[in-house]
Amino acid sequence: MKHFLSALDVDNVSTLVDEALALKAAPWSHENLGRRRTLGLVFFNPSLRTRLSTQKAAQQLGMNILSINVGLEGWTLEMEDGAMMNAGKTEHIKEAAGVLAQYCDIIAVRCFPELKDRDYDYQETVLQKIIKYSGRPVISLESATFHPLQSLADVMTIREVSRVKKPKIVLSWAPHFKALPQAVANSFAQWMQYVDCDFTITHPEGYELHPEMAGNAKIVYDQRKAFEGADFIYVKNWSSYSHYGQILSEDPGWKITAEKMALTATGNFMHCLPVRRNFKVEDAVLDSPGSLVLQQAHNRVYSAQAVLKRILESQYG
Ligand code: CP
């Protein structure tokens, strides 16, 4: 593995999950693998889980870590090749990425979409330029269109908790007053294509994901119907893909309630966090025994560790 941008960079998802679970059982088993190697953590956007879990993962492999909040502390970056830089932007991504490569063996990047220009976002312009101009292995810490470390942790969690061979898994849209990226939903749907499951997506009309992300998922517009008999409910808000970046519904009727969770087979509730309590999901659900949100967050350490381990072994072994 050179880069980790989506499930497409993984030769065998099930084996990677095995590896992440093995690291969870023995976190220090490869504590010298990353010795004298440096991981650069580059954040264009805020984070709690991704930043700390990836840092912990790197430490458990013996790596050094350099971290920058570009959005807060860095120079403003020009992304356009051939740009005349006589206005607000201070540094070109060409130099910035090249400089990062002088200090880091692996570069991990968080760069959310602007949700203005669908082509610009779906071409992963920022991530691709960092790959091109750094020449280093790059890990997505959530990009414009995917959040693969989250999805790997989610698949681990499902593997740990599922009591049936082929679970019914439902990705449900929930309301939000702000336009949010499609990355987590895209990514979860993409990774579900590599899991033996019965996968349903439920959302109001107009919130259909990119067809390649949705794959063969069953689309059900009636949320209650979708929840019936489910083994896992994965909740996320996302803005429209077809009416790109727009909010088409704020219907509070899509909020996740204990009454809806009672329709499921298990009450297992998943969310990547952060989540707005009682706006998107009731306290009674988040505080229930079926809430898996902290287990998902815990697994973020080992999803990052498995990916770093693979890249260290293949690129620097
Ligand atoms: N789930 C997740 O990526 O959390 P952060 O945005 O806090 O990193």
Image (cartoon, rainbow, N blue to C red):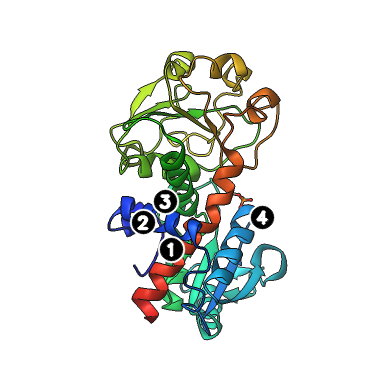
Residue 129, x across and y down, in percent: 45, 69
The Cα atoms of the two marked residues, 1 and 2, are separated by 8 Å
The Cα atoms of the two marked residues, 2 and 3, are separated by 26 Å
* Residue under the image location 66 percent in, 63 percent down: 71
Q: Does the residue labelled 4 lie within 8 Å of ligand 1?
A: yes
In the picture, which quadrant includes the N terminus?
Answer: bottom left
Whether the residues at callouts 1 and 4 have beta carbons within 8 Å, the answer is no
Residue with the mark numbered 2:
16
Residue with the mark numbered 4:
46
For marks 2 and 4, the one nearer the N-term is: 2
Q: Mark 1 is on which residue type?
A: Val
Q: Mark 4 is on which residue type?
A: Pro
**Badge number at residue 122:** 3
For marks 2 and 3, the one nearer the N-term is: 2
Could you say which is closer to the camera, residue 262 or residue 89?
Answer: 262
Residue with the mark numbered 1:
307
How many residues crowd around disc 2 within 10 Å: few (fewer than 14), some, or many (20 or more)?
A: some
